[in-house]
């Protein structure tokens, strides 16, 4: 029995092929795996990956890698993953595994994966921004409509737009904006404002407790909240009629 402190030796190509859960698919792709053009780089492959022939279109190659990954991790394979399949995680795993490979074909595949990842990140950023804007505008929307009890519009258009932009800025930048001219007047209950601001936070960050700088941000938006106890914001209870403020208001999606 060897010393448990010794680092494991690199897996040989033969051992890899013998133990790979993808061996059946490999054999279907070609008869003689010893002729793989990039065989010296196989040590960088994950055990679940197929050995596609060089020259295969990168999009097709990625689809096969995705197939192998899903079968191994998400369909009663080597590991039981409870989380749903996440393509971004797969791409990052492939890049991390293959970025040390020396064969030009594998290097080009890594470049393909990197571009795909950048595209996904940009898309996710756009979707996140749209989600933030949708949440903010919905929960603050009662401020630009006639109040069902006071029968007046709580905020003028300028103040409403300022509050929306300030709040969007907070969630997009994870910090409060600089507010030089807080809102002086609102024609609604303070509790309605505070609960709406809390609803926004919990919808965008459902698993997070209220950040102190968010509570400070709320206080900074309204002049009459100057010096307001931050704990009181958290303790503010939702008015029984709160949902009535949104009757007839449809959530706008991007």
Image: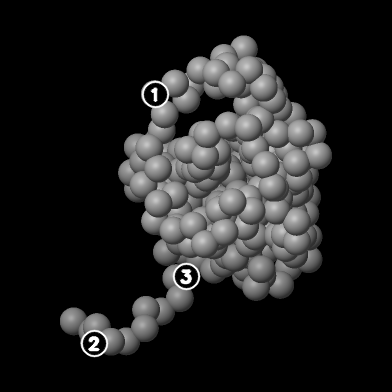
Circle 2 sits on which residue?
3
Q: Secondary structure at mark 3?
A: loop
- Marks 3 and 1, how far apart in space? 68 Å
Q: Residue at x 33, y 44 (%)?
A: 80
Circle 3 sits on which residue?
12
Q: Residue at x 47, y 38 (%)?
A: 191
Q: Nearer the viewer, residue 151 or 3?
A: 151
Q: Residue at x 59, y 44 (%)?
A: 87
User: Where does the image place residue 249, in percent across and percent down from the top left?
Assistant: 64, 17
Is residue 201 at all visible to an observer of this figure? yes
Q: Residue at x 44, y 70 (%)?
A: 11
Relative to 23, say whether 149 is above or below.
Answer: above
Q: Nearer the viewer, residue 178 or 68?
A: 178
Relative to 250, say whether 113 is above or below.
Answer: below
Circle 1 sits on which residue?
240
Q: Nearer the viewer, residue 105 or 232?
A: 232
Residue 214, picture quadrant: bottom right
């Amino acid at each position: 029995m060897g010393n448990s402190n010794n680092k494991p030796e690199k897996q040989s190509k033969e051992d890899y092929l013998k133990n790979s859960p993808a061996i059946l698919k490999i054999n279907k792709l070609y008869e003689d795996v010893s002729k793989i053009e990039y065989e010296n780089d196989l040590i960088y492959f994950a055990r679940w990956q197929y050995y596609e022939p060089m020259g295969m279109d990168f999009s097709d190659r990625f689809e096969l890698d995705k197939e192998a990954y899903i079968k191994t991790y998400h369909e009663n394979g080597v590991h039981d993953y409870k989380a749903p399949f996440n393509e971004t995680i797969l791409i990052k795993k492939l890049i991390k595994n293959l970025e040390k490979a020396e064969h030009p074909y594998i290097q080009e595949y890594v470049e393909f994966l990197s571009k795909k990842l950048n595209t996904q990140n940009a898309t996710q950023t756009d979707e996140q921004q749209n989600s933030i804007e949708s949440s903010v505008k919905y929960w603050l929307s009662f401020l630009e409509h006639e109040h069902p009890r006071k029968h007046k519009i709580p905020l003028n258009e300028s103040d409403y737009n300022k509050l929306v932009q300030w709040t969007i800025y907070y969630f997009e930048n994870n910090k409060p904006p600089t507010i030089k001219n807080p809102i002086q007047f609102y024609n609604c209950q303070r509790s309605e404002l505070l609960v709406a601001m809390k609803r926004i936070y919990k919808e965008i960050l459902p698993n997070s407790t209220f950040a102190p700088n968010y509570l400070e941000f709320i206080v900074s938006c309204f002049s009459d909240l100057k010096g307001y106890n931050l704990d009181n914001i958290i303790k503010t209870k939702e008015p029984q009629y709160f949902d009535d403020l949104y009757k007839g208001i449809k959530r706008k999606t991007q």
